Image (cartoon, rainbow, N blue to C red):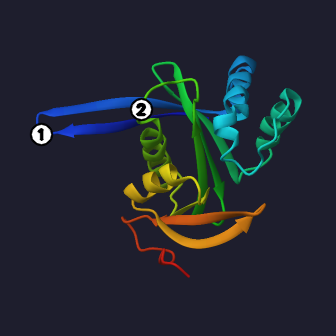
Amino acid sequence: MSAILPILRGGGNNLEILCLELEDYVVLSDLEKKEVLQWRNHPEVAKNLYNQKEISLAEHFAFIESLRQNPKKQYFLLRFCGVGLGSINFGKKSSEEVEFGFFGNPNLSLSGIGRVLEQVSLVFAFDILGARQLTLEVFARNKQVINLHKKFGFQISKEKEVKGEKVLEMCKDNTRILPLRHCGVE
């Protein structure tokens, strides 16, 4: 699956439409798959993931192949004008609740990629997948990403420990429809 998502910015007489392309991992070329793997294994990306070990090419290709058989998981490469900005993934926890994650291309020195990944994730989860609630997990030490999610209306709903580290679950209700459950601290 490939999708073009328009992102609007500006207002009044100044309105820009940015077209971003989401390319499903399962249809990527081998070269694109290798590029995503290189980003994923980059130390700045891996340090914020549960699995921090280096993933081999064979493991990566096998994982992508497994996505063909798993309708609950979707992984996408996000591009703008042919340049890979990052990776976004979605997992259906239920028919109305979706979990997501993303990481930016660590080789780009552009600011604001996280905001773009977040906006695309919200549009895709709420408008395309029809989620009523979007959740994520983030290491408590990752203050920059926590603050980014808060700017987009996510709230901390739970805390837990994973591999000796504090992890926060954050969630956001689709404000266009009634919430599945209130995203408050339990």
Seen at 11% across and 34% down, the residue is 13
Res. 43 visible in picture: yes
The residue beneath circle 2 is 111
Camera-nearest residue between 154 and 68: 154
Camera-nearest residue between 12 and 164: 164
Residue neighbourhood size for the residue with mark 1, other residues' Cα within 10 Å, grouped as few (<14), some (14–19), many (≥20): few
Quadrant of the image containing the N terminus: top right
Q: In the rendered view, would you say 39 is above or below 90?
A: above
Quadrant for residue 163, please give it. bottom right
- Give the residue type at disc 2: Ser
Residue neighbourhood size for the residue with mark 2, other residues' Cα within 10 Å, grouped as few (<14), some (14–19), many (≥20): few
The residue beneath circle 1 is 12
Circle nearer the N terminus (2, 1)? 1
Relative side of 169 to 13, left or right? right
Q: Position of residue 81 (x, y in %)?
A: 45, 19
- Give the residue type at disc 1: Gly
Q: Position of residue 5 (x, y in %)?
A: 43, 36
Seen at 74% across and 52% down, the residue is 50
